[in-house]
Image (cartoon, grey):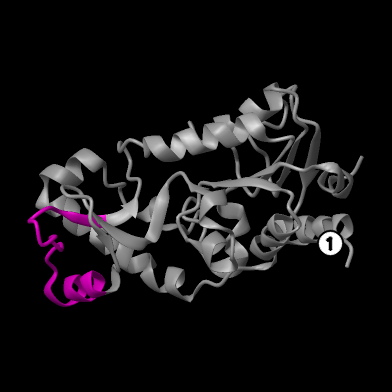
Amino acid sequence: MTLADYLRVSKQTLIFTGAGISTASGIPDFRGPQGVWTRRKPVYFHDFMTSEAARIEHWDYKLEARDAFRAAKPNAVHHAIVRLERAGKLCAVVTQNIDALHSLAGTSADRLVELHGTNRLVECQSCHWRGDPEPHFEDFRINRRPPLCECGGFLKTATISFGQSLNPGELERAQQAALEADLVVALGSTLSVYPAASFPLIAAERGAPYIIVNRGATDHDHHPCVTLRLEGEVGAIFPEAVAAALPE
C-alpha cells in the first residue's frame, strides 16, 4: 500500500510534525550548521528564572528569530493536513513546532497539540497570564530590559525552554490521540526528541500503521513498528498523497 492508500482508508489519522515541514515557510532549521542553536548557548529554564543575564539572552535569541516567525506563512503541508481534517479523517496533529503555522492554516484548536508551546504568545511565569508578545519585543529592543508582567512575574515566550517541564495537559491530549489513532504519519521530524517522539510509537505499538516521511535519517527508521518509510521532501510527498487520497 502507498501513503495515499493508507490515508484513504484511515478514519482517525494522527499527524506528528517536526521542523522539517516548516523550512518551506521560511522558518530556519535552528539545529542546522547555520542555525541559531549552533551560534548561541541554550538558555535553560532554571537560569532564566534566576539570572537577569539569562533572561536577556533568551529575549535576544527570540528577537533574532522574530522576523522569520512573523513573516512565515503556512505551506502546502499545513494546508494538506487541514484538508484531512475537513474530510473527517484527522484524529489530531501533535507537533514539536513552535511557529503556530498549523493554527494559521486552519487546524482546529481541539485537534492541535503544541507540545513545545508557541512563539505567538508570551506567558507570565508567575500568574500564567498570556498575551501578545509584540509590545514586549519592542520594549526589549529599545530598552534592553527583560519584560515583566503586571503582577511582577517574568514574561517569557510561551515555549518550552531547555530544562522546563512540558505542559501536562498537552501531554495527556497527545497520549489520548495516540490511543485513538488508526494511522500515524510522522512528517519532517528526526524523531529524536523525547517525550514527543514517543507518541507515534504508542500508536504504532497498538497496531496502527506507522509511516515516516522525512529528508534524512530518523531515530525510528529501523523500528519494527514502522510500516512505510518515505525518504524525501515532505512538501513534495505528503500534499500529493493527500490529493490522491481525497480526490475532488
CA neighbours of label 1 inside 10 A, class few (<14), some (14 to 19), many (20+): some
Quarter of the picture containing the N terminus is: top right
Quarter of the picture containing the C terminus is: bottom right
Quarter of image, res 155: bottom left
Residue shown at 33%/41% (left/top)?
A: 162
Q: Nearer the viewer, residue 43 or 83?
A: 83
Magenta residues, as a range?
135-156
Q: Nearer the viewer, residue 226 or 13?
A: 13
Image coordinates for residue 190, horizontal then vertical, percent: 60, 41
Q: Nearer the viewer, residue 45 or 40?
A: 45
**Residue 16 seen by the camera:** no
Q: Nearer the viewer, residue 152 or 176?
A: 176
For residue 17, side relative to residue 72 (left or right): right
Quarter of image, res 185: top right
Residue shown at 46%/55% (left/top)?
A: 30
Q: Amino acid at mark 1?
A: Ala
Residue shown at 11%/43% (left/top)?
A: 50
Image coordinates for residue 141, horizontal then vertical, percent: 21, 74
For the image, the number of numbered tags is 1
Q: Is residue 8 above or below residue 62?
A: above
The residue that label 1 is drawn on is 243
Q: Name the outermost residue toward the right.
A: 1
Q: Is residue 192 above or below residue 153?
A: above
**Residue 184 seen by the camera:** yes
For residue 152, side relative to residue 222 (left or right): left
Residue shown at 26%/42% (left/top)?
A: 44
Image coordinates for residue 176, horizontal then vertical, percent: 56, 33
Image coordinates for residue 28, horizontal then vertical, percent: 50, 62
Element carrying mark 1: helix
134 within the magenta span:
no
